[in-house]
Image (spheres, helix red, strand yellow):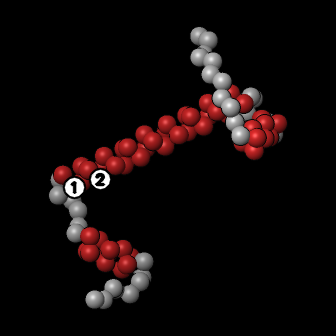
Amino acid sequence: MSEGLKITVTLEPEVEDFVRAEVERGTFNSPSDYVEDLIRERDLARRKLDAELQKGIDDIEAGRYLPLDEAFAEVRTRLGLKPKTG
């Protein structure tokens, strides 16, 4: 395994306390593990969001969409709300 890039990060005291508490609870082995986990989770969330946005773009390009007023009317119906008048 290659040695990772060493980066120093300065945290606000309350954030530092939170990270230390997570490590002390045994959730993570070190503050570095905690930060690495956050980065991985954020990257995964971004990839999922990008994929969902692409699905929406693909639907629009294929003509699979409703005008906004029809879409809101459908949502209101699905939620059991009264139709909006006027």
For residue 56, the mark is 2
Residue under the image location 78 percent in, 36 percent down:
20
Whole-percent x, y for residue 3 in the image = 62, 12
* Neighbourhood count class around disc 1 (C-alpha, 10 Å): few under 14, some 14–19, many 20 upward: few
Q: Residue at x 36, y 80 (%)?
A: 77
- The quarter of the rendered structure image containing the N terminus is top right
CA distance for labels 1 and 2: 6 Å
* Residue drawn at 23 percent across, 62 percent down: 65
Q: Which mark is residue 79?
A: none
Q: Quadrant of residue 84?
A: bottom left
Farthest top residue? Answer: 2
Q: Name the residue type under label 2.
A: Gly
Question: Whole-percent x and y of residue 22?
Answer: 76, 40
State the SS at label 2: helix
Q: Label 1 belongs to which residue?
A: 60
- Residue 69, quarter of the rendered image: bottom left
62 lies above or below 84: above
Q: Is residue 32 above or below residue 71?
A: above
Q: Nearer the viewer, residue 6 or 32?
A: 6
Q: Is residue 72 left or right of residue 23?
A: left
Q: Residue at x 32, y 74 (%)?
A: 72
> Is residue 20 visible in the rendered structure shown here?
yes
Using a 10 Å C-alpha cutoff, classify the residue at mark 2 as few (fewer than 14 neighbours), some (14 to 19) or many (20 or more).
some
Label 1, secondary structure: give it. helix
Q: Position of residue 75 (x, y in %)?
A: 36, 74
* Residue 27 appears in the figure: no
Question: Looking at the picture, does residue 43 appear above or below residue 82?
Answer: above
Q: Are marks 1 and 2 in contact (CB under 8 Å)?
A: yes
Tell which of 49 and 14 is nearer to you.
14
Q: Is residue 44 left or right of residue 61?
A: right
Quadrant holding the C terminus: bottom left
Amino acid found under the numbered disc labelled 1: Ile
